[in-house]
Image: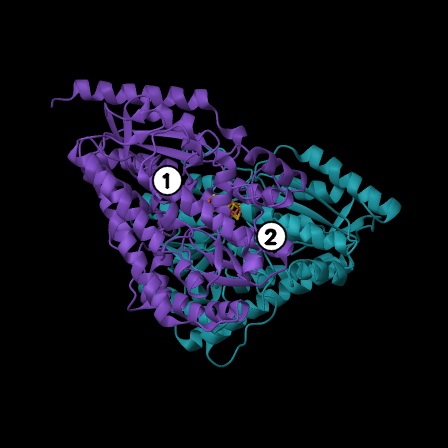
Chain colours: A purple, B cyan
Amino acid sequence: MSTTTTADVEKEPSMILQKQMIGDHFHELARAKELGKKVVYTFVPGNLNELIWAFDMLPVHPEINALQSGMRKKSGAYIQEAEKAGHSEDVCTYVKCDLGMMKKGNIGPTGERLPAPDLLLLSYTGCFTFMKWFELLQREYGCPVAMLHVPYQGDGEITPAMKQYVVDQLRDSVIPLMEQVSGKKLDLERLKGFLGSSSRAEDDLCAIWDSAKHKPSPIDSYFGGVYYIGPIFSAFRGLPQAEEYYKSLRAEVDARVAAKRGPTTPDGELKDQKFRLVVEGPPNWTSFRDFWKMFYGEGAVVVASTYTKVGGLYDRGFRHDPANPLETMAEYCLGCYTNRNLPTRVDLIEKYIEEFAADGFVVNSIKSCNSFSAGQLLMLRELEKRTGRPGAFIESDLVDPRYFSGANIKNRLDSYFQMIDAKRASSPT
Amino acid sequence: MDLEAIVQRSEALFRDQDLSAVKEWKSRTGGKVIGFMPVYVPRELIHAAGALPVGVMGAGEHAEIIRGDAYFQSYICRIPRSTIELGVSGKLDVLDGFLFPAICDVIRNLSGMWKILFPQKYARYVDLPQDFGAAGRAFYRRELEGMAEDFTRLTGKAVTAEALRRSIKVYNENRRAIARLYDLRSEAPHLVPTWELYLILRAANVLEVTEHTKLVEAYAQAARQSKRPERDYVRVVVSGAFCEQPPLGLIRALESSGCYIVDDDWVLGARYLVEDVIEDGDPFDALIDAYATKTVSTASRYESTALKGKFLVEQVRSRRAEGVVFAAPSFCDPALLERPMLQAVLSEQGIPHTGFKYAENTGQIQSIKEETGTFADSIKLWGTA
Ligand code: SF4
Ligand code: SF4
């Protein structure tokens, strides 16, 4: 989610701003010990950023390190390092990439060493592997773990008991442990301030997602979208920098809408938008640019995606509510995309296809990720049946370069685009 | 019944994909049947509503997967696809409902697939808390109450406190009988070959609990009296096979490679709780307390580093095992991510270990047998692997 790989692209102010924010953050992390700051490792989905900031601690998100390692072509070696240390080739490569990076000195994306955690904040949303991941890290670092079990929306809804359970854990175990580690009492007013800031940034982000309803779409909600979610899914939600970033991004998008311009790709503006698509599943990071090019090179623009909702479905109405700090954090954790059951995921994608007037949808099935992948073939069938629009199923991995077969994916996508064309030609307009 | 007849009956139950015994129970009693996936659900609640809990552990090596593969990518374990195969081919029609406990993302997502595929059937995701303190207990109480309400609706029979206490009692008896059988196997493993014990355990998935208890006791009695020769085998604990099950042939091969299996973690549905559930007082409290504090350690339960591996080491010590064989299904994130942590603890304690992966229909039995044989030999020769 950094802008490091788009060096030769025409830079918009929001991109420069994001790069600056990320650079500053990693720099601060590198100096955390000398600044006397405590460091919290935590996961993206259901992260409690506002709470971390309220304790003046600094967050590190291991998945972001892993995807950065993927983009910087370092993940393959890290994964091998973890496999050499006894990890199975079958398990989630984010975990192995992170463990391998740690074993190789824990050098972050800016080339500086990341500090060891003072606390592992295991907010356990939408994926069981997270739990194992931090069990593994606890063994390595020996620091305390704050466990926050977020129940799953088995029936596709958040019940009062689920919310209460999360609130109880926050109040009775997570916050007391954070107080202990940080040496500070929780200042509720400060927390509310961060939550208010989050909701303002969330408003702007939603307007950005919504802009893809325009034709041409001024954004790419998947390949471009992963940059857009960077600040809000990672360290910056709750901070003025994030508000500023989303304001600036929104202004750029508004300007593109007014000028009827398409999104910026690594090869400049996407002008001729032939296919409007919805994408389910995370992207591949090791060949991110090649992968993106398989879409924009054929005039395909992604108008909505589910991956960009793993850190919150703001577009379905959720906003952090400063008036009810614990309840709103609970609701946020419970609502992340992979914490919703399969029928709800299908409903959501169906709505995206309709609302964004998509020609079809693509499922990128990730070998590593059972949380996303188990059930996607049924999702594909259901969606084709319900929407009458064709779906494509491709397979890759997040950060394991061994599982990215560019030629296969390109072939599949090309024939998929031809199929949409053929369908169009045969159906009366 | 003599030993051979008991084992034969259990093997017939194990191989019977049509769930004839369950159908027979249903037509005899007119009761409802509720299936459940591994690892654990509180079967007492189902029983207290007058229904029969039925453990579903995939289709094993028997079924040819024709349609199930169309639902899952190649990099997902076998058990969900064979379970779907059983479902779409009508072999699970006898189930009036199906429970999917919170153990991993695959079974979790399978709960939603079931809702899509079989909308007319009752399907419930059973969320097991990972917080074992007051917050988790309060949440689990709501889960239990919610299930009790569902089962009451399904069966028309209220889950009263009294009925639940009665069910707790019969399940305690069952767990004690199984625990005694495990003790016997550990004391005299030559009298209780694991493949037989395994079949007896698997019968817990389909038999009414009191009938199963009788089966376990009859088997234990017959096994105790059998005149089987003692062999110079190495005593091992098997760990990691808590969900998708190894084929029976593989279990037999492990033994014939020179290993007495003296503890294991298969069919945990019947062995998840390691102590009696309290039989008086509020039965919901008793089930909650048992879940929070009296269970095996397994990969789907959160565990801090301080506790990691303790249960396994204790198993090794109390069963006087000489090594551990890690057996995990391919692509099983929980088991395979757990393994290196457990291995590290064992190595620190000087306990030899080896490991392999399998699928429920694996054909690689010979090579696994050779590997475990080498492991057993090296322990025998040098006391280490
Ligand atoms: S399984 Fe998927 S969601 Fe879970 S940690 Fe791995 S990549 Fe992330
Ligand atoms: S075998 Fe492992 S990954 Fe597969 S369903 Fe069971 S616990 Fe989940």
Would residue A282 be found to the left or right of residue A86 on screen? left
Q: To which chain does the residue with label 2 belong?
A: A
Quadrant of the image containing the N terminus of chain B: bottom right
Residue type of the residue flagged with mark 1:
Ile
Identify the residue shown where x is 42% and y is 77%: B161
Labelled disc at residue A76: none
Residue type of the residue flagged with mark 2:
Leu
Can you name the residue that lies furthest to the left here? Answer: A429
The disc, 1 or 2, on the residue closer to the chain's N-terminal end is 1
Residue A52, position as x, y percentages in the image? 44, 61
**Same chain assignment for discs 1 and 2:** yes
Residue B205, position as x, y percentages in the image? 52, 54
Quarter of the image where one finds residue A13: top left
Labelled disc at residue A136: 2
Q: Is residue B98 above or below residue B60?
A: below
> Ligand 1: does it lie within 8 Å of the C-beta at label 2?
no
Mark pair 1, 2: CA separation:
36 Å
Quadrant of the image containing the C terminus of chain B: top right
Mark 1 neighbour density, 10 Å: few (under 14) some (14–19) many (20 or more):
few
Looking at the rendered structure, the secondary structure element under dot 1 is helix
Q: Is residue A389 visible?
A: yes
Quarter of the image where one finds residue A20: top left
Q: Check disc 1 and report the residue beneath it.
A: A16
Looking at the rendered structure, the secondary structure element under dot 2 is helix
Q: To which chain does the residue with label 1 belong?
A: A
